[in-house]
Amino acid sequence: MAHSLPRGWDSRRHGAHHLGENPTISARKARGGRGADGMGAGERDTLVSVILGIDTSLGTAVAVVEADGVVRAEAASANPLGHAEAIGGLLRTALDEAAQTPGPPVVLTHVAVGMGPGPFTGLRVGIAAARAFALGRSLPVVAVPSHDAAALGILLSALLADPFAEPERFAVVTDARRREFAYSVYDGLDDDGLPVRVAGPALTPRDDVDAALDGARRHDVTTIPATMIALAAARAVAAGRELTGTEPLYLRTPDVTLPGAPKKVGA
């Protein structure tokens, strides 16, 4: 498997910080003559393409990230509840911060959303918010498994610590409630700079999780960074790949009881 050191991991540019540049990714710039927006080609070429990342599989997280990994803004709440109350304010905070960051103006090209695994209520809030935001702006939505985003962060941190170390198989483990854990197992990065998932996501009883991991190093994750949701989406878009389908990864039946058919009233 191909691995590359994330260049400029801690570098600063225009007041933003860099997550790790993938050489295959470059910000797409609008081109052409003067359009309906009143801007000419040269003016449009100063715009920087960014992706909005959203995840509500654990807490609530929002980020605005350039396609090459530069973070323009991020906002998050670690509270595993209250997603509906938090998401609107976090979106406003991140978008306002991204617009005010020194440097070239930004233009949103995609909305990336974490698809879980996670609880029904939390996931539903984030996915609905991402789809509504994208629909109102005619933007495509990129679905990202939340565990893949966590794995990407773990792998990039390991590369920063030692770019020559052989990556070890590891597992992302999250609390699925009901005395169960959700887990996914990974084995390095592929040629597109994306985590290679070799197992999961799946559920296992808490007492059985270590056996289920089959020797993979365990990483218990309590937050999913929206920055990594956006970066994984950027790399997938650049490679022309889909990371998952459009259905949330609940892993179990939602705790929702639908009302039965109305009873007939006898004559």
Image (tube, grey):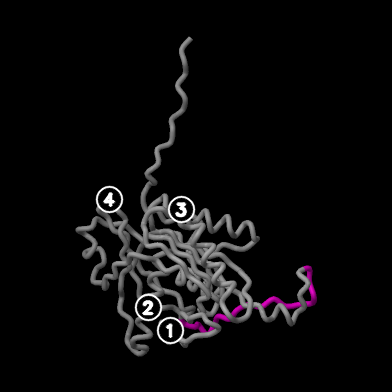
Q: CA distance from mark 2 to mark 4?
A: 29 Å
Q: Secondary structure at mark 4?
A: loop
Q: Nearer the viewer, mark 2 or mark 1?
A: 2
Q: Amino acid at mark 4?
A: Arg
Q: CA distance from mark 4 to mark 3?
A: 24 Å
**Residue at 41% over, 53% down:** 82
Q: CA distance from mark 3 to mark 1?
A: 42 Å
Question: Observer-nearest residue: 248 or 175?
Answer: 175
Q: Nearer the viewer, mark 4 or mark 3?
A: 3
Residue farthest to the top? Answer: 267
User: Which residues fall within the magenta stretch?
Assistant: 20-36
Q: Amino acid at mark 3?
A: Glu
Please rate how many residues cluster around mark 3, counting C-alpha atoms within 10 Å: few if below 14, some from 14 to 19, many from 20.
few
Q: Are marks 2 and 3 in contact (CB under 8 Å)?
A: no
**Residue at 48% over, 70% down:** 74
Dot 4 corresponds to which residue?
A: 178
Q: Amino acid at mark 2?
A: Leu
Q: Of the two numbered discs 3 and 1 on the same chain, state the one appearing first in sequence.
A: 1
Q: Looking at the figure, which quarter contains the N terminus?
A: bottom left
Mark sitting on residue 155: 2
Q: Position of residue 5 (x, y in %)?
A: 43, 87
Dot 3 corresponds to which residue?
A: 85
Question: Observer-nearest residue: 156 or 101?
Answer: 101
